[in-house]
Amino acid sequence: MTRWIRHQRACAAAAAAFALLGAAACGDSDGDSGSPYGADPTTAETSASPTPTETATAEAPASLGTATDDDHGEFLVDNDGFALYLFTTDTPNTPTCYDTCATAWPPLLTDTADVTAAGAVDAALIGTAERTDGTLQVTYNGWPLYYYTEDDEPGETEGQGVQNVWYLVGPNGDANTTDT
């Protein structure tokens, strides 16, 4: 995914968040019990209708790698070094983050099931899941992978532990819950 597309997604997500939900729309990482994506989870949209973020198609095959920092240890990143997250309410190979959720947490999309691996990534754990709009979302150990729009630069991990349901993904395929 090019920086331009990522920048456009981030700008669109920020505008929507401020316009519809206010400055705190995406929650924070203090572990309170609010929504994982800025709305009451009992009333948040979870329909199959795609948002503008979801209607974008992947430009090329995805590539997974790993990064390491002092706070979180080793975690998955995309080919540009942006952190990838899992949503603990997803089920294996079934994304559940759509609409408002996907505005704050865009899925990692690919145009092919041939996703490449680098670093400590276990290629046997890489897969894809079809989203309701027909796009392919990259999975790791069955977990659909997402970005966080608050991560503006490669290596940022602002989404770690948000609402106790969003976590970095460890190379073993599990939620990396360190320092949440």
Image (cartoon, helix red, strand yellow):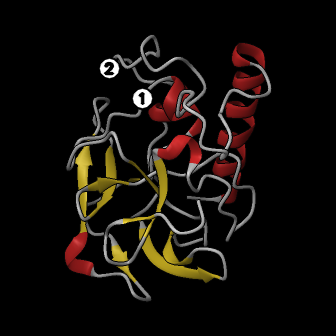
Please tell me which residue is depicted at 28% across the width and 29% down the height of the picture: 132
> In the rendered image, which quarter contains the C terminus?
bottom right
Please tell me which residue is depicted at 40% across the width and 34% down the height of the picture: 97
Q: Secondary structure at mark 1?
A: loop
Compared with residue 118, is residue 127 higher up or lower down, i.e. above or below?
above
Tell me, yes or no, whether the two marked residues, 1 and 2, touch with CB atoms within 8 Å.
yes
How packed mark 2 is, by other alpha carbons closer than 10 Å (few <14, some 14-19, many 20 or more), is few
Residue pushed farthest top? Answer: 43
Front position in the image: 78 or 85: 85
Q: Secondary structure at mark 2?
A: loop
Which image quadrant for residue 94? top left
Query: x and y percent of residue 151 in the render?
Result: 69, 55
Query: x and y percent of residue 152 in the render?
Result: 75, 56
Front position in the image: 149 or 180: 180
Front position in the image: 43 or 31: 31
Q: Which residue is mark 1?
A: 98
Query: x and y percent of residue 48 in the render?
Result: 32, 20
Q: Which residue is mark 2?
A: 48
Q: What amino acid does circle 1 point to?
A: Tyr
Q: Is residue 65 left or right of residue 159?
A: left
Compared with residue 113, is residue 58 higher up or lower down, i.e. above or below?
above
How packed mark 1 is, by other alpha carbons closer than 10 Å (few <14, some 14-19, many 20 or more), is many
